[in-house]
Structure formats: C-alpha cells, structure tokens
Amino acid sequence: MKKQGTLEKRTARQALLSIYDEVAKCNKCGFCLSTCPVYTITGEERAVARGHNVHLQNLIEGNLEMSEELKAPLFECLLCRACVENCMSGVMTHENVLRGRSVYVEQLGEPRVLQFVLRKLLPNPKKMDFYVRLAALGKKSRLDRAAKALGVLKWFGRDRDKVLDLVQRMPFRFFRERVAELGPNPQPAHAKVAYFVGCATNYALPEVGFSTVKVLRAVGCSVQILGNVCCGLPASSYGDHSAFKNLAQRNLDIMANLEVATIVTDCGSCSAFLKEYADLLADDPEYGAKAAAVRPKLKALSEYLKEIGPPEFRGRVDARVTYHDPCHMSRYQDLVNEPRDIIRSIPGVEYRELPEADWCCGAAGTYNIAYYGQSMQVLSRKMENVKKTKADILVTTCPACYIQLAYGARKHALRCEVLDLADLIARALNPPHP
Amino acid sequence: MKKRELIRKMESIVGRGNVLHSRTALLVYEYDGSLQRGLPDAVAFATSAEQISRLVRLANTAGIPFLPRGSGTNLSGGSVPAKGGIVIELSRMNRILEIDLKNQRAVAEPGVYNLTLQDALAPLGYYYAPDPASQKVATLGGNVGENSGGPLCLKYGVTTNHVLGLEVVLPDGDVVQTGGKAQEYPGYDLKGLMVGSEGTIGIVTKITVRIMRSPETVKTFLAIYDSVEDAGQTVSEIIAEGIIPATLEMMDKLVMQAVEKSVHAGYPLDAEAVLIIELDGLSDGMDRLAQRVIEICKKNRVRAVKVAATEIEREKLWTGRKGAFGAVGRLAPSYMVNDGTVPRTQLPRVLKKVAEIGEKYDLPIGNVFHAGDGNLHPLILFDERDKDQLELVRKASYEILQACVDVGGTISGEHGIGTEKLQAMWLLFGWKDLNAMWKVKRAFDPRNLCNPGKVLPEMEIEESKTAHA
Amino acid sequence: MLDHSVRGKFKEIVGEAGLKEGREIKGFSIDGLVPAVVLFPGTPEEIERIVMLALEEGLSIIPWGGGTQMGLGAPPRHVDLVVCLSRLDRILDQDHENMSFTSEAGIRLSAIQKALRHLGQGFFLPLDPPCAEEVTLGGVVAANASGPSRFRHGTPRDLILGIEVVIPEEIETGNKIRAGGKTAKNVSGYDMSKLYIGSLGTLAIVVEVTCRILPMPEDQATVMAAFPRPEAPWACTRALLESQLTPCSIELYNRETASLLPMRVRPSAEEVAWAAVGLEGFTEGVERHIVQIERLVRSQGAEKIVILRGPHEASLWKNLGRLGLQVRDKGARSIGLKVSVPLSMAQEISKAISNQGLKMNVPCYQLSHAGSGILYAHICLSEGIYGEKEQALSQMVNALREQVEDMGGSLVIEYSPAVFKQRVDVWGEVGGVFPIMERLKREFDPKDILSPGRYVGGI
C-alpha cells in the first residue's frame, strides 16, 4: 500500500511547482522557530515552517522524493498559522504544507481506514451516526468488539485508549436527533438564520448546539437547522482533495438556495473553512460560483452577534472568565475582539486575559488523535497559562478546542469549567430559577 | 567506523529517536540563516554536558568532525557543516538554571533564546544587555559563539563584555569550567577566546552572564530623513557631541518598505532613511539630552522626529527593525547580508560605495544597520535559485568588504566569519596574523575536528622555522 | 652574564644608549633576580629583532613597562634580559570622532590622558589602575590592571579594540602580529586581544594598543562618607546595586587605609569604615546622585559626608591608587592580595581579612571595588615582623584562598617577598582548563623564553 513515488517523480515535482515561488520566499531567517508550538516541544527543524518549506523546495528541485519519511514532517504541523503571522516575509507556509499533504496522498495513497472515514462516512450522515454510536457504546462499555469495530481509530494507532478518554462522555443521542426538543421558533422573528451544525457539535457537544439556538433566538432569530454534512476541513487537512470536494459540493448544494441572509455556525473551524470554499474551488465554474455567492452570508456566532448586537442579559454569571482563541478564529478569520467583547458585556463576569491566548491548544482538529503525545505537550503549555489566570470558566469558540481544553482541565486537575461562548451567553440570558 | 555502528553508538548516548541520519531528515540541517549549505552525516539531540562529552569522544574515536547547533540562525554558515560530520543539536538544552539577583548574574543552558532570558529578567527589573535583532530565536549559546552585538551594544558592549563564566566541552571531550560568577580568575582568558570562536574550539554547555538593573527611563525616537547622507551625518554629530545613546540604528527606504508591510509600525514609505535613536538612564537631564539630539537632527535637515509615546509604539518600532532581514523576503526570495564594520565617520563614504557596487552588478541593496558603531548590513536582494546571480552576489559582497577594510574597518562586526568570509580574512590579516590564530585553534583542537573549515582559512605552515613542541 | 659578542649584537639593534647594565639596572629586579642587561628599544622593529636574537641565543626575556607591578607573578625561573618599553611612547592615532586612540605600548597612562584632554571637546581613556602616573599602556594590558572606574567602564578586556604584539617565533616576514582593529565591534577571527591581555608577558610583548576613548563627562564629583559600623558601607553598596542609579565607582576602605590619605582631619576612632562613590555624567544626573547617595549613607549612620570636586577629588583617587606603593614604602616585606568574589560575598571576605589582621596583629590596609566584588588587602610588614610571622601568614593566605575559592572566586598574591611566593602559590586554582593554557604557551613560546615560570602552574 505504501510505495515510493519513483514512477510518479515528475508528477510530484509538477504538482508542487505551483508553490515553488512561495516556498522559495522563505529566506531561512528562523523567526518562525519560537512561535511554532510543535518546534517548541520537539526542537526539530522538520516540525517548523522553515523546515517545511525546505523539504518542499527539495521535492520541487528534485533532491528528494516523496516517501513515507515525509509523513511526519508534513502531517505533524498543527496548521495553526502562528508562523505565518510572524513571518517577516509573509510566506504562506500553511498553504504550502497543505499542498504538500495533498501531493503526499496522491503519491503514496491514504490509509484505507482514513479514506473510509473521509469518503464514505463524512458525506453520509446515517452511516457516520452508526459508527459514532458504536464508538460511544464502546467507550461506555469498553467492549472489545466495539473497539475492534472502531477500525476508525486504527489509523490513529498506539494511543487509542487514551484517545477514548478525550471526550468525557459520548452522548448516545446526537444533536440532530434531538432537534425536536428545541421547540418552535419564536414568532415574530426579526431575522431568519440558517445554522450550520458542525460534526463535533452534533456528535460530541450537543449542549453547545442547544445553547447556540437559544442564543440566536434570544436575539430575535428564527433558526433553520441545516442538513449539512462535514464542512470538509479534516479532508482538506489530510490532503484528500477529492473527499473535500465531494463534501463541499454537497454543502454548497444545500446552502446555495437558502432564503436566509446569514448562515451561522458555532464552530470556529467550520466558519473559517467554509469561508475558504470560494478560493479552494476557484477552478470549478459551477461550485466556485456557488461558493462565492454564499461567502458573504457566512458568519461565526460571535461575528454575527457583533453585527446585530448582543442579547439582553436578564441573568448574570458571577465568575472569573478567560478566553482561548481558536486558531481558526484569530488567525484565519481575525475574530479576536468579537468573542471578548461579548464576554465582557455579560453582567457579573470578571474578564481575565489569558497569557498566550492564541497559542494553539494542540487539538488541531484530530491532531490530538493522530499525534497524541505531541498534542498533550502543546496542551500542557496552554493549561499552565490557564492556571495563571485562576479563572473559574474558560471559554472558547470551537468544539475541537473545547474538547481538548476540557480534557486538559481534567488531566491537570484544574477546577476550571470549560464552556463554549454560546453556553456562557445562554447561561446569562435568564435569571436562575428560584 | 562504519556509519551504522556510529549511529548505533550515538543512539546509545542520546537515545533512539534522538539521532537523525536519513537523507530526508538531514536535509533540514543543511542550512542556517546564511546562504551556506552543508549536509551533516548525522544529527544528535543532546540535553546534557555529559551527553555532549560522550558524543565528542565518539567523534574523536571515529575521527569525524562535529559541531554545535542552536536555532540555526547563524548568518555566516557557522551552524552548517563544512566537512560533514555530526551536528550536536542543543535546542532542547533550554533551561534558565538560575537568576541570581544579589550577584547580578544569570546562569543558563545554551539553547535558551536570548529573548526568553530577557523576558524572565524584565519583571524583576533587570535585563541582559546583548540584544541581537534575532533575539526571539537566536540562542545564548549562539550569541556566545558569535560574540553577538545588538542595538544596545553601542553603549553597553557586546556578548563578551557580559559573559563571566562558561562550562565547555573541549574538543577532546573534557568538560571544564572557565570563569564563574566572580569577575577575575587567574590564567589566560580562555573564556574570552571562547566567545566569538564560532564553535571551533569547544561546545558551550552552561553560560554565566552579567545582568543589569533596567534603566529608569527610556526614550525612543524615530527620525525621518530625505537623504541617507543627512542621516549618516546626524549619527556622526551625535557621537561627536559626546552623547552616547543606548542605540542608534538606521534603515533605508528599501528596507523600510519591506518592514512596514510586515509590521505596520508607521514607518514612512517615502523617506530615504530613518534613524531609531534610544536614550536611557536617569530621568534627570533626559529632556535636555533629548533636546540636544533633536537639535542635531534638525541641523541635519531631518524631516520629522517622532517620539514613541507608549511601550507598544516602541515595541512596534523595534519589531520592525529587528525583523528587517526576514522582511526583505517580501521584496526578493533571498538576501545576502554583509557585516562589514567601519569607523563611524566613514559611513557616508562606504554607503556611497555600497550603492555603486549595487549599480555595478545591477543588484538592489537595502541598508539596515547599527549606525552608532559603524556596523553595516547591506542586504543584497536576489533569487538564490538563479546560480548566476548567486555568483554576482558573492563578488559584490567581497567588494563591499574590501571597501570596509580600505577605510580602516573590518569584515565582520557580529555575524562571524563562518565559511562565508574565509577568503575575505586575507583582506584583513597577513599570514603571520592568521598563523597566530591557528596556534589558538591547535591548542584547543589539535585534530581539527571541532567545526572544521570555519573562521580560519586553510594555509601552509612551512614558513615558520621555530619547532613546535 | 651576557656573552660579549651577543651583547654587541644587542647594542647594534638598540644603539649604545639602548643597552644598560651593572649598577644602572639595580632597580630592574624581579623577585630578587637581576637581568644581565636591560634593553630600551626605540621601535617595534627593534623589539622584533631583539626577540629573534634571544631565540637564537636561548635567552629569557621579561618585558617591563612602568615597573610598578613587577611583583605580580611567581619568581621567574631565570632572567637574562629585561626589555623596557619606555622609549616606545609615540601616539599613532587620535580619532576622537570615532572614539579610538592608538599608541605604542610604552606610553604612560598619564601622558595619554594629558593628550586626550586636548582632543576635540576633551576625551579620556576610562582606565584608572593604581599608580596611573607611572604605569604604561602595555603594562596595564599585560597585567589586565584596572581601577575603581571598572565598575562602569570595565577593564582592559572591555576597552581594547586592537593590539600588536611581538611573539617569540622565527618568521622570515617578521614576528609582529596584529589582532583586532579600531572599530567598536569586530568579530573577524578569534578575539586574540583577550589572550594577550593579562598574559603577563608570557606569550608576547605588547608593542601597540588601540583602545576606546570617551568624551569627558560634563560633570564629576565624589561622595565620601565615614561610618561607625563596618557593615554600613556594604549595606549602602547593596542598596546602590539594587537601585537604578549609575555611579562610576563604589570604593570601600577601612580605617587603616583612610589614615594614609592626606586629610585635614585625621579619621576619628568612630570612623571605622569608609566609602567613596565616584560620579560622572550630565550635571542633573550627578546632582541627583549626590542627593540620593547622601541620603543613603546618612541612613546607614554616616555622619561625616564630604562632596569632593576638582583637585581635592583628584587627590583622593590618586592616593587611593597609590595605596600599595605607600604600604610597601612603610614595610619592605609587605604582602598584597587581590581577591575576586561574587558581589554578595565581598563583605564576608572583607570581614575575614580584618579578623585575620587583628588576630595576627598586623596592619591590614583594605580597599575594595565593592561594585565589582574585587578586594585588595595590603598587609604591611617590616623585615622583622615578616620573619616572625612568615609561617602564620602563609597559613592565613592559604586559609583565605580556600574560603574564597569555595565561594567561587579567586585570590592572587599581587606582591610579596620572593621567599613567600615559594611557600604560597601566587595564583591559586586554575582547574581543568590548565592543559589548554600549557598548550597555548607551547604554541606561542615553544622555547619558553618569555617570562618563564611567572604564570599559573609554573608557565
């Protein structure tokens, strides 16, 4: 299954030629080293932007062939973009890495299990539900059989057991299955919004889904739950361009004909990635156009709330609150003040700025599964910083970060509660029941 | 010793997984911040002096070269093997071991970033004077190897003036101490020789530095000029008046444009040059001093002088200046930075010569430098993928260094000789001067295994008639 | 004694007047050893030829500057020639705009300062070692000598930009070599200056030096205070070091030392410990320092506080600089120690020295560069007293050295009777780096003709 790309050498070089100028822009000043969460842990050049660009340049110049040895260098990047932010030359290393990944997959193929998930499960919610439920069951009862059926985790190897702990509780009923509990939308509504429900929210954090709807309704929206599939970020991150396209097309088909002005999502990663559809599909006349048309409607929750104004807070949250910037919110969308402003506006909140607030938490989607050890080391640094704030509540705006941070809080025995921004807002909407 | 055996032995010292030897893995150790390239035979990640000592002894047994590497931001090829061998990577030896305020010393491992030490000291009201532009990523060990400077060195000196003690693994593997927390020790100043030796006479494993009480007041100015000559003249006059600012830096238009794109610090895009002037000390008399400086600027036709009103403004100005090298990547993919240093008064003349050389070879050259101590950094912009251009760039650089030497200057103020300036050493020194340096090298490293091919050009030693012991 | 033909060859090099011997050179003894001849070369080229000839003839050489620190070092194994650089005193370059100064090594420090005062708006060389009137630039460099202002300005290793030396090697093109340059920053090649500085004439003869000069400060003053308690000035020192004030020097001395200084009123019995804080800089800065330091010393119990300026200030520093000379005048068999310890340990050592002095009933004149952790102890001994106490003295010095080395510092004997140096090692521990030092010596002076035996470990 794993083969050397000798026959495809020309193809690999040609496939990467389009980024040659971008990688060559790196003049090796090394300023990326101290900003890279992975390099900070490993101290290895292959882990940092400079090293990535050099590997890619060598591939393009024919000094190196695509091989399994490039798997770790290409795939252990968090794609957090800290390097890009600090790169004095402005090299878009994350794009270079993604391109490298997709060429890797083209050349050396993809593990079958991963292919299965990205191409067969993610586009097919019913099938996905089945397997996730199996995982939930397996986690609850720890049945060997269930674990085996969880071939999904095989690709993620040795740390499988620890990985099962990542999510504290796998809900048995997913958000989409509980939509009826939401009740009807308020009448009359000031606005109609569509709610793009991300996979993590649906499968692991349904409460966040409930909070999001509650918050949207509190600002006078009537909420339409979209029947979307995975936004495609995992597929893109793993270099599976065709899997991404498939997912994107399905989502665009759903989103293109909506009669809403806004499509909101609570997930920072989803909102960032959906906004990239237009660029990623630029070569596709039909879907490129659809993506461009949809783009202006896409908003992260805090972004939308900033536009239309916060809800009325009839309750309060008396707590010390701090905030972690998901990479996809701060660096990909430049949404830094929006969540903070809302938090600060909640009555009773004492806001404390988190040191290194935008330093990656190590989740990076499913990085914590694929590179558990490294992910945990990155997480430690985040937890040390959280400890410094002595906060009661740690808020974030991405479910992947949420899961990672909650795990971190448990692991490091912090008495800090992790909440999504939607949860925090929802809590303050009404005074507590007597 | 066969390679496999070597690797096995290395792994037994630092652990499996901490030795890189495949071509793919080694390709990212072929470079540093310069244009020099050299592939190692292996890379070992060390975390203690003991490990380094054993690795060095192993290299001695195998008869292969070895060299230390920190962040690899070296600008002359120092971190890149000239003759293959083992790279001993120190990036994981990165603990600050002690901050001793009552003795005004700090002790750190070589892999600590310079800025990390600064950040640890700042809340205590102290700082470490050598502040090279690369301080965000350059390590203390690297600073020691190159005798790094930085904008503050005009007033406060360079690394060698602030290093009090070193623990070193000698080229034969012995671990020794030179210097310490006190200021004087009997015997030859081996510590003084070690600083700036570019990793060719030993590997530093622990560094004791002097830390200083932060100044009461700091005032930072941005002086904007419509001509490079006026800016250069201002520099001369400030010094001639007996004012020694904490820093006195210059950037020209080309560099400023690149920098402003990166950091948006408010650099003017249409000015020919700017000076960043920083005064520090007691607040008493600071205003008068500032006034004198502004007057000198005005006398030299300054367009405007802005004072950084907040710490954030000040930091932005410095981020721009310190990131200048990297920033020119927005103008061209590669750069060659020269490090010639000249007597201050010769600056205008040399800058003119640099511009002429740029025109001669049709290469754009930006200037950013420590005007106060005459340390130029002409940045020649080009694309290293074009091998013909690379050749021209090398020629132009040599001519620039020649111009510096011609006016009584030197070929390297802080980046070191490495491999890049080996031939240029002959511009400065004669055979016997270099021979004396070879004596030092021989005394420390008779087998020439410790980062060979750096600093000193190879030469014949027949000329001497005196027998060697 | 020197072979007649060899003497002739030397005369040929330096000229009739450049060679002295017999009664004329009685003052040129090193630890009791007198050379056969003393040579006074007039140019660096003459020195090159002298060294080449000495190599050929296997003669040992000891370089000589102002002769004030010849007591430093172990007794030489032998002394054939002394090469005195006093005629090499030309100023070669005074570049005040670039703040550098180059001269031959035999020039007296006082001559440098005089010349610099008239340069531009007035400059100075920030070096103030003891006996500044007599010392030569080359001597200061060879001994790495320094004074109170090292606190702000550093020592020769911080001030030398370039150097030319003559090494004992037979090279056709000459054996004078250059290192460094005249720029403030220079990392071209190894920092050879660091090797030569402090090498005490065992590796090379320094013939030319380029150093950093500074503009004269706008204002200068010294705050002098006397304290009733010995701990008090140390507490002041600590407070100064922790503050953001920037004095030029912080000198502490004891009553014995104070009694040697010319003062209108003798120190009283209550004034047991003294401090002199040197200030230089802009007028406002100096004023502020004076105010704050006065307050500080008063808070530690000082009652006598004097602000010195002009000639009175100069006189204080000059006399402090001549302390060693004065002690040696009073007691021909005196012993001078130089201690270097981490800053916070200086007080303890000072106390230990005082106690020892009391115990042994010998007057001990102390002077510390308190801000640098450097202490000088001059133990005044006449012939008789020395003879009586030799054993106890050697025990004392060894014990002190042990205490100092445990603190991570060093203790060096700056001068003493030659016989004392046979009992107590002049230099102390060097540690695991010694083999490198030996190799350096062998590389530079393979025939061991330069100051043989004077340096650490018998180098």
Image (cartoon, coloured by chain):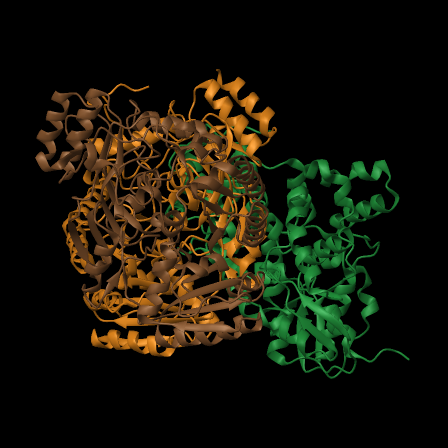
Q: Colour of chain B?
A: orange
Q: In the rendered image, which quarter is residue C168 located in?
A: top left
Q: Colour of chain C?
A: brown
Q: Nearer the viewer, residue A48 or C104?
A: C104
Q: Is residue C295 visible?
A: yes
The reply, left or right, for residue B293 in relation to residue B362 is right
Q: Nearer the viewer, residue A101 or B231?
A: B231
Q: Position of residue C423 (x, y in %)?
A: 48, 31
Q: Quadrant of the C terminus of chain C?
A: top left
Q: Position of residue B166 (x, y in %)?
A: 48, 41
Q: Is residue C187 visible?
A: no
Q: Position of residue B297 (x, y in %)?
A: 25, 74
The residue shown at (41%, 76%) is C287
The residue shown at (20%, 43%) is B398
Name the residue at the right extreme: A434
Please tell me whether residue B325 is drawn above or below residue B141 in the rendered image.
below
Q: Nearer the viewer, residue A242 or C370?
A: C370
The reply, left or right, for residue B80 in relation to residue A108 is left
Q: Position of residue B48 (x, y in %)?
A: 57, 35
Please tell me whether residue B124 is drawn above or below residue C375 in the rendered image.
below
The reply, left or right, for residue B232 in relation to residue C441 is left
Q: How many marks?
A: 0
Q: Quadrant of the N terminus of chain C?
A: top left
Q: Which chain appears green?
A: A
The reply, left or right, for residue C415 in relation to residue B437 is right
Name the residue at the top extreme: B1
Q: Nearer the viewer, residue B6 or C266?
A: C266
